Image (cartoon, coloured by chain):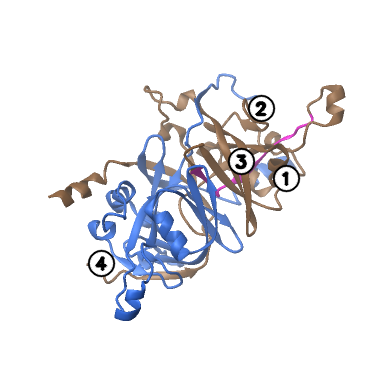
Chain colours: A brown, B blue
Amino acid sequence: MADQSIKFKSIGPQNFVLPCPIFLVGTYSHSKSEKQESTGEDLRKPNIMAAAWATLCSAQPPAMLVAIRQARHTHKSILEHKAFTINIPDTSLLAEVDYAGIFSGEHEDKIAQCGLHAETGEHVDAPYIKECPVVLEMKLMQHHDVGTHTLFIGEIMDVKIKESCLDEAGMPNPTIMDIACYIPLLREYWGLGSFKAKAFGVGKTIASQKIK
Amino acid sequence: MADQSIKFKSIGPQNFVLPCPIFLVGTYSHSKSEKQESTGEDLRKPNIMAAAWATLCSAQPPAMLVAIRQARHTHKSILEHKAFTINIPDTSLLAEVDYAGIFSGEHEDKIAQCGLHAETGEHVDAPYIKECPVVLEMKLMQHHDVGTHTLFIGEIMDVKIKESCLDEAGMPNPTIMDIACYIPLLREYWGLGSFKAKAFGVGKTIASQKIK
């Protein structure tokens, strides 16, 4: 029997699920221009914005998506370059992440202002942030408007992990990575906790109970 | 200057971002049938599956999406009922969550097997799980195929939170909720950590440095 004393409070149709991730989306703000063709100067401007509405979305091809408000500067940049990066920050970068979420790249160089460093992607026309422990290079596959936002669905072309965040077996170590979560409604950044259980493992105890 | 000693290791195009959430998607497996019309018997069968690929995706209307593999039983159920629930489990339910991710509702009653209890949604034709601290009722708005998966995009019709998870001001308390995260690639469930910083707040320190 379920505990009959369980009571839910309805808070209405709010944007509340947890945890959300917190990522920096990296793009170039301008195309290579004709002027650049003649001078050789790179006029692309690297930019970042903070995004918490993102998820993996296909196993084959490996893909993920990020939902971005239609008014954002990054929205135009992704459509122009058909590419973006997902940069996963650690908790030491939360002030920079928050700054990148408050201000617009239309008016300032957020990367320089935050003291971060951009590197051009190896596989796509978008910059990644060298300070982040994990970086994904994304090639735009599809985009769909949903209410106030657009879903930008990208094929994952590569995942890069800082060598210092890998364990002896070459696997990523979430504790060393020290990644952050975002809690909507509260508008708070939280850390990741500790290991609880093996997936595709702990559930088998219930299956074996059934067999008995 | 960025630390020149930072080295990335490429692990190729893997499905790896973190943290992922971990949710139970609740659906009814069968429609009310004609037989039911005559007997009054409710033939809908409540079912759950585990899903880690999900995110908020629109502010207005409030919406979220979940990516579900096309072969899954839940895939058919969402299309049939145009509704689903998102149930956020706490870490005490991880064996049940894992079980719901390994086995299919086509062949068994996963909710009964896990000792969980389903309640019909107030706003949509889908069941929610009474043991979960947070429940969202979702009305299907759009769906799009992406590779191996389909994005089911739903309007958030209501969010319910267990009263025991609210603080004195009526706000959700993530520590009491004790929610879990999923780490792909490692295939591990982790807990949520602790508060780190205020969003739309901590970034202003960088803005004020700029003004100086």
Q: Chain of mark 4?
A: A
Judge depth for marks 3 and 4 and give the one in front.
3
Q: Earlier in the sequence, mark 4 or mark 2?
A: 4
* Marks 4, 2 in one chain: yes
Magenta segment, which residues? A43-57
| Mark 2, residue position | A120
Left-right relation of B138 to A127: left
Whether callout 3 and callout 4 share a subunit is answered yes
Work out how far the residue at label 1 is from the one at label 2, CA to CA, in angstroms: 19 Å
- Secondary structure at numbered mark 3: strand
Which chain's residue wears label 3?
A
Q: Which residue is mark 3?
A: A141
Give the residue type at disc 2. Answer: Thr
| Percent x, y of residue A200 | 31, 41
Q: Looking at the picture, tell me which residue is in the foreground, B69 or A13.
A: B69
Q: CA distance from mark 1 to mark 3?
A: 15 Å
Label 2 secondary element: strand
Residue corresponding to mark 1: A76
Disc 4, SS: loop
Q: Dot 4 corresponds to which residue?
A: A2
A187 sits left or right of B116 in the view: right
N-term mark: 3 or 4: 4
Q: Amino acid at mark 3?
A: Met
